[in-house]
Image: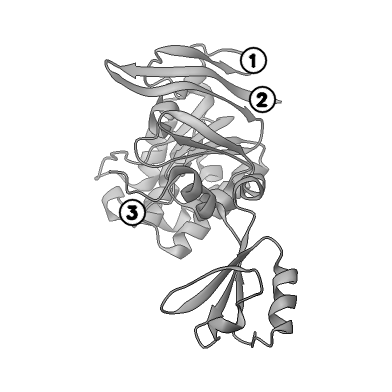
Amino acid sequence: MSILEVQNLQKHYKTVVALEDVSFRVEQGCCFGLLGPNGAGKTTTMEIIENIIEPSGGSILYRGGPRDDSFRQQVGIQFQHTSLLNFLTVKETLRCYRQLYRNPEEIDWLVKRCNLKPILEQRNNQLSGGQRQRLMLALALVNRPELIFLDEPSTGLDPQSRRYLWDIVDEIKADGKTIIMTTHSMEEAQYLCDTIAIMDGGKIIAEGSPAALIAAHCSTNTIKLPRTVVESALDGLGLDYHVDNSAIFIRTANVDSVLTRLLGAGVDLSEMSVQSPNLEDVFLILTGKQLRD
């Protein structure tokens, strides 16, 4: 069942078209990812759904109907950049935010869910990046939301903090909550998201599960061989390969068939490795490799 439906969303700024006919559905209890290069329209889409800015056209349905005044009481938002009062402790910040809602979550639950107990008495300006992100996630959960927006949740975090945050997000999903997130980390999107929409130029250019997107747009694997392999041994095998200074790369959708041919040609495979396609490969194929400012 869809908890949110976006229909033909448009946003125009004078001569600039930021969004053009953006449509998608978000199913209850899933993690939906919006991906795209800078300027693709991700942030604009999120801010319209969050009811922060008005669209130029289109509609948004929440639980089958238009959003009403209660919508903001039913969603939680973790912004990428949020100012906190430096002189407040983590516990005081939680208490302050709880006062903004009619039916706030218990502090003990928030502390346990986001592992805040070790830092409850620390002031906000003393928090590390990972600690701050856990607090921001707790603040997004303070009103018991059914729908949660995460904007670049792990930006700037070290690997340990990032993985810990992902575990918390997984637990939130297990509670039956629905998550809509943006991220520039393809690894994060592939790990967390059930469904992904890739945007570019204000439009959705691909949508599906990570596995479905990879299968549809980047089904080939890459076999990597060391440069010690003589290129002439590959001639006549009908392989799609290229060579750089460090290795030989063979692209194929049928690894077993290529390995059989290489073994038949007497190629040493002791230092071979196989690289499977991932979401980043799909992203670059669809949006290109040119830098976006």
- Disc 3/disc 1 C-alpha distance (Å): 43 Å
Q: Amino acid at mark 3?
A: Gln
Classify 74 as above or below 253.
above
Residue 208 appears in the rendering: yes
Element on which disc 2 rests: strand
Q: Nearer the viewer, mark 3 or mark 1?
A: 1
Q: Are marks 1 and 2 in contact (CB under 8 Å)?
A: yes
Nearer to the camera, 202 or 42: 202
Element on which disc 3 rests: loop
Q: Are marks 2 and 3 in contact (CB under 8 Å)?
A: no
Q: Which residue is mark 2?
A: 2
Residue 112 appears in the rendering: no
Nearer to the camera, 171 or 229: 229
Nearer to the camera, 17 or 59: 17
- Disc 2/disc 3 C-alpha distance (Å): 40 Å
The residue lying at 61 percent from left, 78 percent from top is 234
